[in-house]
Image (tube, rainbow, N blue to C red):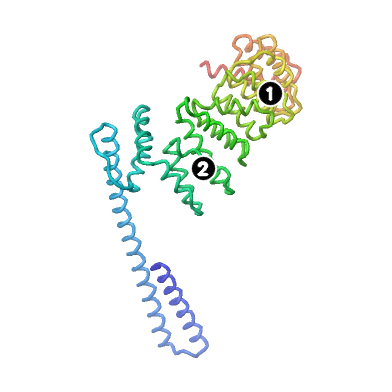
Amino acid sequence: MLVLTIVVLEAAAMATLAAAFVLNATGRVPYEDLLLAAGAALSAIGGSVVVLTGYIIAFHVFATAREQRRQERVRGWSVWWRGLLQYTRRDVAGELPREAFDAFLDLREVLSSEENERLAVLADRYGIAEQLAGRLATKKQTRRLDALQDLARARLAPALPAIVAQLRDPEPLVRRHALRAAARTLARIPAAVRAAGVEAFVRALREVDLPPSLLAESMLLLEEAAAEVVAPILADPASHQPALQAALVAAGRRELRGLAEAVLPFVDHPEPEVRAAALRALAGMGRLPAGGEAAVVARVDDERPFVRVHAARAAALLPIESAGEVLWRRLGDSSWWVRLAAAESLGALGAAGRSDLERAALDHPDRFARDMAQQALADLRWKAA
């Protein structure tokens, strides 16, 4: 309010000064009155600047002091929580203040697994999850986002249903924060009791309107629970494409080799993005299931260049003879990226692949293939130096 008042006063002073100059120019105000108006306006502007500067300095000093006092209270509550963990502190009566929640959230990030388990038991005693989830019952988006960030740090199982419900929010930013909070929470739920949470999370992933990259990020945050979420998505033909692509990315990035057989059918999926994701997943797993060799060889000649790129990388998993043959062909591909992937895959095959690169650098019928082979050999020499 003070800042608005100062701005209004400055605007009025400037308007008065401008009007005085205009009236003096038209002869309606004598020069002496103009000087008086100018002095008064400049005094008002100077005074408002001084007041505003003092207000800003005082605000920062007050805010800094207030934050220091808050941090001291948070540290005090951290000591209290640690005392409860060590059975050297007693419970407190009544509702916990905000600083107690902040201390709890800080400890969740730094304590060991065993201490975090005991801290989660204390959270149940004090209803931490219910109180944090209760903050979601507001129409203000900023408050919901703050609540979801706190829930993502808390990672408490009782709050999972409330977090998953936020995945249906019309605002994409809220859905994104809810997705991350749900994944981090699910990762902390013990394997013996997380089946219901996994089912709810999978159901939400099939419905949520977010891009595959964000869905994949959430699956990577699942840690040891990733396979339990990825497997049912890959097993369900009705899974919509974003969730399917995300599951394939997570399977490769988490190296879920036990799901290689479930990934293989998607190498022939009608959507090229899914085919590419499946090939990338197999390459990330480092192994091909039964029937995988023929599928990869077929995709090396895919009509889409970006699919051929991932097929060329997955071809490094083929037997040496088959790998050398298909990668030799892709060295002459029309796409520079496919040629690069083929050359790098040959370089990863050891002595046999290096021999193929040396031969390609001299004898390959495609000039661009020869250039790429020479560059790949130079890179190998540089890495070996």
Which residue sits at x=58%, y=27%? Answer: 230
Quadrant in which residue 356 is drawn: top right
- Mark 1 or mark 2: which comes first in sequence? 2
Disc number placed over residue 230 in the picture, else none: none
Task: Classify 10 Å Cα crowding around label 1: few (below 14), some (14-19), many (20 and above).
Answer: many
Residue marked by disc 1? 339
Q: Quadrant of the N terminus?
A: bottom left
Which residue sits at x=37%, y=71%? Answer: 48
Residue 376 coordinates in the image, percent (x, y) = 62, 20
Residue 258 coordinates in the image, percent (x, y) = 58, 18
353 shown above or below 134: above
* Secondary structure beneath label 1: helix
Question: Horizontally, is 207 left or right of 185 in the view?
Answer: right
Disc number placed over residue 177 in the picture, else none: 2
Mark in front: 1 vs 2 = 2
Question: Horizontally, is 161 left or right of 318 in the view?
Answer: left
Quadrant in which residue 204 is drawn: top right
- Please name the amino acid that badge 2 sits on: His
Which residue sits at x=67%, y=22%? Answer: 372
Residue 185 coordinates in the image, percent (x, y) = 47, 35
Residue nearest the observer in this picture, 18 or 295: 295
- Please name the amino acid that badge 1 sits on: Arg
Residue nearest the observer in this picture, 194 or 100: 194
Tell me the distance, in whole angstroms, between the alpha carbons under discs 1 and 2.
Answer: 39 Å
* Secondary structure beneath label 2: helix
